[in-house]
């Protein structure tokens, strides 16, 4: 187990990164008030050992973090901040024994001797606060078909859909929704498996795309009515002190592909070639915010997340998918915070940490935990 204390963490560029508690100052009370000294809280940033093959994707990582940058940001405000690498279940037991005030981590689960141990479930059991949603919520949004089913049950707008794999729908008559259709993997992020062929206009194209996803993504396909309107992503912040949700819509404009369609595909995301703009129309802003908040509640999201929405040809917003562990680099979630709340990156990280530190009582209070281990 490796500890990197705040005093040894690499120092940020002092010319560009604020170093005082002024990061918490916010005229609209979006973040914590200024304090005269560092706050006496203990925060552990949890990581896992890096993979030897940099091309392999960590399936158990929900949020990619720059842990050293986040450590420096938090260390400007909180008294005890460290980075902890977890290599074994014994390391987790040691974490529980230290009982930090907050765990700041994007790890979903650990694989110890072939057994999955979900971090946030484990922290819940020991009354330790963390920054993101629990396993139940993450399970609800990970399978895109399941998430849409929950939306339909709640009466929220989402495109008609079904899931399939090669030969499961062998004839055109077995498809009960009309072309054009949109085909993508049922799970996964970053638009993997999505390209110009994802919009299918006939049965042969449908078969070819389903087969491609099965072969290249090792996944079943989610097939839904193609929504031809504008695309949006809505960041969500949950305020534990008031129980309210703040929605932060942004519009994402992809370049037209070879078919003249604006599809947010894998290459566009990989090369960051899409345009992201603020939603200025107050009516659309309200529509997106209302749908996103409702979807977040349906999924039992916690703390923060992102809801993706697209308009149909009648300009009606439809739920597409959710990400309850959105990336905390300078992606869509950060841009939604910057464009809607005028937050800097540092303020966003501090807001997430402060919110985690004010989370509701978990299964054990600190005093109950102390008594349980005596």
Image (cartoon, rainbow, N blue to C red):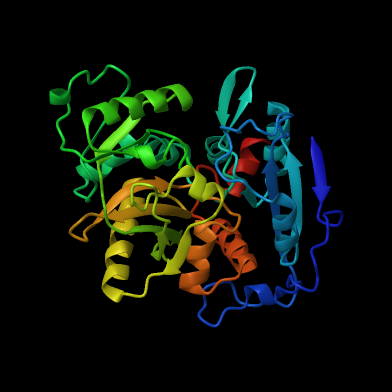
- Snapshot quadrant of residue 235: bottom left
| Residue 37, position as x, y percentages in the image | 75, 73
When the figure is inspected, residue 6 is found, relative to residue 59, above or below; the finding is: below
Q: Quadrant of residue 75?
A: bottom right
Identity of the residue drawn at 32% across and 47% down: 320
From the viewer's side, name the closer residue of 26 and 53.
53
Q: Position of residue 257 (x, y in %)?
A: 40, 49
- Between 228 and 294, the one nearer to me in the picture: 228
Using residue 295 as the reference point, say whether residue 90 is left or right of it: right
- The quarter of the rendered structure image containing the N terminus is top right
Determine the residue positioned at 57% across, 48% down: 130
Extreme residue in the front direction: 258
**x, y percentage for residue 302?**
45, 51
281 sits to left or right of 123: left
Location of residue 336 in the rendering, given as x and y in whole percent from the top left corner: 48, 64
Q: Is residue 26 shown above or below 169?
A: below
70 up-or-down from 21: above or below: above
Would residue 149 be visible to someone looking at this image? no
Residue 98 visible? The answer is yes
């Amino acid at each position: 187990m490796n500890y990197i204390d705040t005093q040894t963490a690499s120092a940020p560029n002092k010319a560009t990164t604020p170093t005082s508690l002024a990061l918490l100052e916010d005229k609209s009370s979006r973040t914590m008030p200024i304090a005269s000294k560092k706050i006496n809280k203990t925060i552990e940033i949890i990581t896992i050992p890096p993979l030897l093959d940099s091309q392999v994707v960590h399936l158990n990582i929900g949020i990619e973090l720059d842990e050293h940058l986040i450590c420096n940001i938090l260390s400007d405000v909180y008294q005890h901040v460290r980075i902890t690498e977890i290599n074994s279940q014994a390391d987790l037991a040691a974490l529980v024994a230290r009982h930090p005030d907050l765990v700041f981590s994007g790890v979903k689960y650990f694989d110890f001797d072939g057994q999955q141990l979900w971090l946030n479930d484990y922290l819940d059991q020991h009354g330790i606060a963390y920054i993101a949603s629990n396993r139940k919520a993450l399970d609800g949004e990970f399978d895109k078909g399941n998430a849409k089913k929950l939306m339909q049950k709640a009466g929220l707008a989402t495109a008609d859909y079904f899931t399939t794999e090669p030969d499961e729908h062998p004839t055109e008559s077995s498809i009960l929704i009309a072309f054009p259709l949109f085909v993508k993997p049922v799970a996964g992020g970053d638009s993997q498996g999505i390209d110009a062929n994802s919009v299918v206009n006939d049965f042969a194209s449908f078969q070819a795309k389903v087969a491609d996803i099965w072969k290249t993504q090792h996944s079943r396909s989610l097939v839904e009515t193609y929504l031809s309107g504008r695309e949006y992503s809505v960041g969500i912040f949950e305020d534990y002190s008031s129980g309210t949700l703040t929605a932060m819509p942004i519009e994402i404009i992809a370049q037209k592909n070879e078919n003249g369609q604006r599809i947010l595909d894998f290459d566009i995301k990989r090369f960051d070639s899409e345009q992201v703009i603020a939603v200025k129309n107050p009516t659309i802003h309200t529509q997106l915010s209302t749908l996103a908040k409702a979807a977040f509640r349906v999924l039992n999201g916690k703390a923060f997340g992102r809801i993706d929405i697209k308009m149909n040809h009648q300009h009606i917003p439809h739920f597409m998918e959710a990400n309850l562990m959105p990336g905390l680099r300078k992606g869509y979630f950060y841009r939604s915070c910057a464009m809607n709340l005028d937050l800097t990156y540092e303020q966003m990280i501090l807001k997430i940490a402060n919110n985690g530190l004010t989370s509701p009582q978990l299964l054990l209070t600190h005093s109950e935990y102390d008594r349980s281990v005596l």
